[in-house]
Every structure is written in C-alpha cells, then in structure tokens.
Amino acid sequence: MALQNRHLLGLEGVSKEEIKLILDTATTFREVLERPIKKVPTLQGKTIVNLFFESSTRTRISFELAERRLSADVVNFSADMSSLKKGETLKDTARNIEAMKIDMVVMRHASPGAALFLSRVIDSVIINAGDGGHEHPTQALLDLYSIQEKHKRIDGLKICIVGDISHSRVALSNIYGLKTMGAEVAVCGPATLIPSEIEKHGIGIFNKIDDAIAWADVLNVLRIQLERQDRSYFPSLREYRKYFAVTKERIERAEKQITIMHPGPINRDVELSADVADGKHSIILQQVLNGVAVRMAVLYLLGTRS
Ligand code: CP
C-alpha cells in the first residue's frame, strides 16, 4: 500500500488505512531511534529543503533529524537571511531553489494554504509543517502515534482539545485525524476561541474545563496564541488561567487516570500548570521523541513513492 497523494498538505481526506500505514511505518523507525547508530540509508541521494518562514523549535529540528537519520542531503532555508528581504516572492524563491535539483520541500508558513500554493508552482514533493491557522499534519500524526502508544488504541477513546481552537492548526489536523481513526472528540475553551462552525466536524463542546476533564481519557492542551490574536478574546491571562487552565488540583479532583498532551511551546502556568506539564500524567516529551519517528515515516513513504 502507498499514500494516495504525492504531497502531505493536511489530514483532511487522508484515509484510515493511510494513517495506519504512517503509524505502522513510524513504529519501525522508532526502533531505529533506539539503536546506537540511529541512521538508515533509505533516502540516500535525495535532497530535502526545509523552508521555514515562521519560527519553530520542535518541528524544524525534528524534520532535520528525521531527514539526516534517513541519510538525505538537507538544506535549511531561513527567511531572515534570504532574498525575501529584497522583495522576492515565495513562488520565485521556491522555483529558484528547485532549479538546483531538489526532491522534497518541508515548509512552515504563516499563511493558510501556502503549502497547497507551493504544490501548484513547483514539482517537488511538499510536506506542510504548519500553514497559518490551517493544518499541521505531522503534529497530528505524532499525537495519534503517542495516543496509540500510551492507550494501545485510538478507536473509542475520548479526546478533548483544550484552549485556543480558533487560531490552531494543531486542533484542525487533530480533529481530522482523530475522527478518521474512530475517536470521540470534543473541544473546550472560551466561546470566543471556538469557531462557530466547529460542530460540523461532529465533535462536542465543553465550556467548563472540569466537565472536559471528567469526560476525557486524553486532554490535548493548546497554547494560547497571543501572536495570532488581533483583538482580546478573554479579559486577561489571569482570567483564562482561572477558568480554563489544566492544573494539578483539577486533575486530582477528578480522581481518574488521564493523559496530558501539549504540542508545545507551552505557556507554563497559563493553559497548563508546570507541575502537570512535568508530572506523571504528561506524555509531552514522548510526543517530541515520537515526532522524529513519525516524520521519518512520512519522508520515507513520500520520498520513495513511485
Ligand atoms: N509543535 C510545534 O509545532 O512546535 P514548534 O512551533 O516549536 O515547531
């Protein structure tokens, strides 16, 4: 079996079988990451360009590690040091880089649809590493992998995505992936940070974090994206913390096993208290580790697809 599309632009429309293929392939690469020599020759001879127009720690380093562990040649593009500063367009930038004979592009960009646009103007394989508030497919895939690793299943689990849903590409990709894999999905946050059309995805909405904690097997807590908020969506961070933060007290009060996830970066003691982020319920650093294996799987499946 192979992936249907030659690009990974999002999880919308990606089938259960394709997601299972990616997760199963990631398990093989997860084993490679435990070896003394964490490298395989799978993508030898392929050249991959990482085009990051927005800041990133986890995704950028994770992709670069994944590419190097697959023995690809890697070029990192930094928007700040490029001719974009002189007014060159994204299309011209990409076409000029492609003229140097590359095979794949991993791109993060602030504009929703930027990855789709790129796939229409160059021939290389495109992997979306986050396009504005639209999708972040590899984050959702690593979240799915981490949930499956922890709970041995995804189907039938109750997963609540908490926080700034409106500005989150992680939320949308997670909703597509989780629903496809048979999970029950809900969101929780201030009404001003939940898009009105969210119910069309067939998911629940909680307005109180205690109700969400009581319902869920897994909480995927999202960062409050202050940099994308063009106006005030809640009175203050103090208010947000009071009504929506996932804290030790709230989890202990629920008296249940619950898994805590966060894609990072965390606003510690805003959406998630530091003791929960670092505590026994958290699988946050496991998510980061699994991210390398999942990205190796995506790069392998797309890079060797005929
Ligand atoms: N989760 C995530 O996308 O983190 P970065 O912004 O650091 O890549």
Image: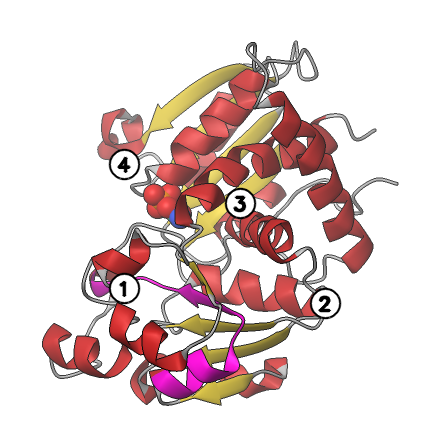
Q: Nearer the viewer, mark 1 or mark 4?
A: 1
Q: Cα distance, mark 3 to mark 2?
A: 26 Å
Q: Tell me the number on the disc at residue 87.
A: 4
Magenta residues, as a range? Answer: 210-226
Regarding residue 195, the answer to whether it shows in the image is no
Residue 301's spot in the image, x, y percent?
73, 33
Residue 45's spot in the image, x, y percent?
65, 9
Q: Cα distance, mark 2 to mark 1?
A: 26 Å
Describe residue 295's horizontal placement relative to residue 229 as left or right. right
Q: Kindly state the secondary structure of the residue where label 2 is placed.
A: loop
Q: Cα distance, mark 1 to mark 4?
A: 40 Å
In the picture as drawn, the residue positioned furthest to the front comes out as 255
Q: Cα distance, mark 3 to mark 1?
A: 27 Å
Q: Kindly state the secondary structure of the residue where label 1 is placed.
A: loop
Q: Cα distance, mark 4 to mark 2?
A: 48 Å
Neighbours of disc 3 within 10 Å: few (<14), some (14-19), many (20+): many
Which residue in the protein does label 1 denote?
Answer: 272
Q: Kindly state the secondary structure of the residue where label 4 is placed.
A: loop
Of marks 3 and 1, which one's residue comes earlier in the chain?
3
Residue shown at 58% from the left, 56% from the top: 147
Which residue in the protein does label 2 denote?
Answer: 155
Question: To which quarter of the image does residue 294 belong?
Answer: top right
Q: Return the residue nearer the eye: 168 or 263.
A: 263
Of marks 3 and 4, which one's residue comes earlier in the chain?
4
Tell me the amino acid under the disc marked 1.
Leu
The question of residue 220 being in magenta is answered with yes
